[in-house]
Amino acid sequence: MTQDPDARDLPTAPALALLAQLPGQVAVVGADGTVLAVNTGWRAFAAGNGLSPGLAEGGNYLKVCDAAGGEEAAYAQLAAAGIRGVLAGRQHEFNLDYPCHAPQQRRWFRMQVVPVGWAGAQAALVMHTDITGLRQARDEVLRLNASLERRVQRRTRQLELANKELEAFSYSVSHDLKAPLAAIDGFTHVLAERLRDRMDERESGYLQRVRAGVAAMFGLIDAMLSLHQLARSAPLRRTNVDISAMAHALVEELRAAEPDRICRIIIEPGMVMTCDASLMAVVLRNLIGNAWKFSSRKEVMQLEVGLEWGAPAGFTTLRVSDRGAGFDPKLASKLFAPFQRLHHASDFPGTGIGLATVQRIVQRHGGSVRAEAELGEGASFFVSLPEVYQDTVDSNRED
């Protein structure tokens, strides 16, 4: 047999000395399967586990493997095939993890076989390493993963149930609550018409306040439903959106509604963000609308829309600033919570749902939103969205 060029032809004496120093259980197996030499670790392992005498020096490793039976027979056959492959030069290395259980302990070993020259002839160095600890660690990881998977499945079922309950609640809100409100509004309208000439100013004011309360309640219900529907809406469709053009269009709508208002508007040209265009329009409508509303008591309405320098890597940050009423920075934690208002409704009307909607949309995009303000000095909102472009349906939607 031609010697493998990778095998080292070691003199017998140095080879035996080197073999004795190797850790683990190591044997040298000749071309016919004869065990030519073993180290101390191999002898101790064989004695402690009652292994076949055929695995001692002079025995035939391959015959022992071929004759193996029971549950470990398959591993023994794989080992024999691997050793023969290395001895024949068909492969330069063979590895196998196999069980070798002692009477009182479940153990696993890793066999590694490489070619070696031994006393001028082709042989194989067979090394066995105890990997019981590694197997136990692997089994523990698998157990933890299975436990985590069960917990995720349980949590998913809980979320599905919660979503169904939320759907039922939303249906109740849109039908069961709106119906009596519509009745109240209708009957108060009829009373106001019938009693128009018999009511004094105070009584007429009472009816007006009732109808105003009903209208406010309708607005809150619609806002709550809109926020819920936003979480259940269609998948994101990200494109490169012209933010400058969108902002100009929204400002023109507001100006058309209040043509006499004095405004100083600065919109940075050429702004582009990667986002869902329809949802980004909702974000801008809320932010620019808030700037417009909370600047209503200023002689000159000032609005700036531009990109913020120093955005985090991979993100684009949009800034919307005004010089309006602002808010107390100490109350900023309440800013994006639904129905939380930092100003009295009589000063600045609204439902308190706009900024919660903004945050929900931005979070669906994988971004973030924050605000800076001083009471009476205006506010700035910063919307950061990832720059990753997707021309397909977003797979990370909320189901």
Image: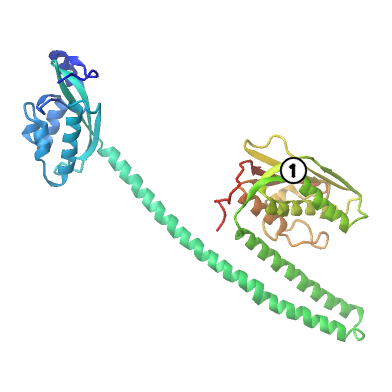
* Residue at which label 1 appears: 319
Q: Nearer the viewer, residue 398 or 100?
A: 398
Instruction: Reply above or below: 305 against 281.
Output: above
Instruction: Give coordinates of residue 398: x percent, y percent.
Output: 56, 56
Give the side of residue 27 with respect to residue 152, left or right: left
Instruction: Give coordinates of residue 128: x percent, y percent.
Output: 20, 31
Quadrant of residue 10 within the rendered picture = top left
Mark 1, Cα crowd under 10 Å, few <14 / some 14-19 / many 20+, is: some
Look at the numbered disc 1 and give the secondary structure of its residue.
strand
- At a point 83% along the width and 84% down the height, the residue shown is 191
Q: Nearer the viewer, residue 13 or 60?
A: 60
**Quarter that holds the C terminus:** bottom right
How is the structure coloured here? rainbow
Instruction: Give coordinates of residue 41: x percent, y percent.
Output: 16, 28
Give the side of residue 252 with respect to residue 115, left or right: right
Q: Nearer the viewer, residue 80 or 319?
A: 80
Q: Nearer the viewer, residue 284 or 312?
A: 284
Can residue 60 be seen here? yes
- At a point 20% along the width and 30% down the height, the residue shown is 85
Amino acid found under the numbered disc labelled 1? Arg
- At a point 87% along the width and 86% down the height, the residue shown is 194
- At a point 55% along the width and 51% down the height, the residue shown is 396
Quadrant of residue 163 within the rendered picture = bottom right
